[in-house]
Image (cartoon, rainbow, N blue to C red):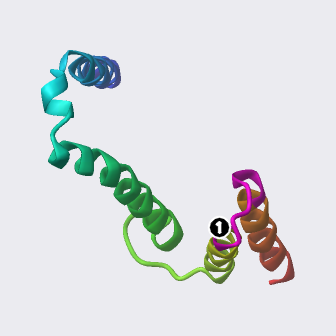
Amino acid sequence: MSVWIAVLATAAGCYLLKLGGLVTPQRVLDDPRVRRFTDLVPVALLTALIAVQALAPDGRALEFDGPRLAGLAAAVVALLLRAPFLVVLVAAAAVAAGLRLLG
């Protein structure tokens, strides 16, 4: 039963978060500090997610996995070459899978 309470609480929290975005006055959204915050927070969260998934897959300790880091490096190179997102994903997956297959 506690799982359903957590699911319902999370659903309510998500709904309230979306509602908060809809009822926020325009003057608050026009503030340069809020604009800067909303521009930078998604990048920071995505970077943190990538770092955790690449370096701590179990969420408890750092683990330097060669194929995983090589796949991340391939994705970075593809991004620097301005490749489309799908190409970035395929390059990273191909490098990581190829190295796992070899090793």
Amino acid type shown at disc 1 = Leu
- Whether the magenta-drawn stretch holds residue 84 is answered as yes
Disc 1 marks which residue? 79
Quarter of the image with the C terminus is bottom right
Residue 23 in the figure: left or right of residue 1: left
Q: Quadrant of residue 8?
A: top left
Q: Which one is in front, 38 or 30? A: 30
Residue at x 73%, y 55% (from the top left corner): 84
User: Image quarter for residue 59?
Assistant: bottom left
Does residue 58 show up? no
> Which of the pair 82/87 is nearer the observer?
82
Q: Provide residue 92's location: percent of width, then percent of height.
A: 72, 67
SS class of the residue under badge 1?
helix
- Residue 15 rendering spot, x and y as whole percentages: 30, 17
Residue 52, placed above or below residue 40? below
- In this rendering, would 13 be left or right of 45? left
Examine the rendered structure and indicate whether residue 77 appears above or below residue 44: below
Is residue 88 found inside the magenta-colored segment of the image? no
- Along the viewing direction, whichever of 91 and 80 lies nearer the viewer: 80
The residue located at (59%, 80%) in the rendering is 65
Where is residue 70 shown, x and y percent of the image?
Answer: 67, 80
Quadrant containing the N terminus is top left
**Callout count:** 1
Q: Residue at x 78, y 73 (%)?
A: 95
Q: Which residues are magenta?
A: 79-87
- Left or right of residue 11: residue 78: right
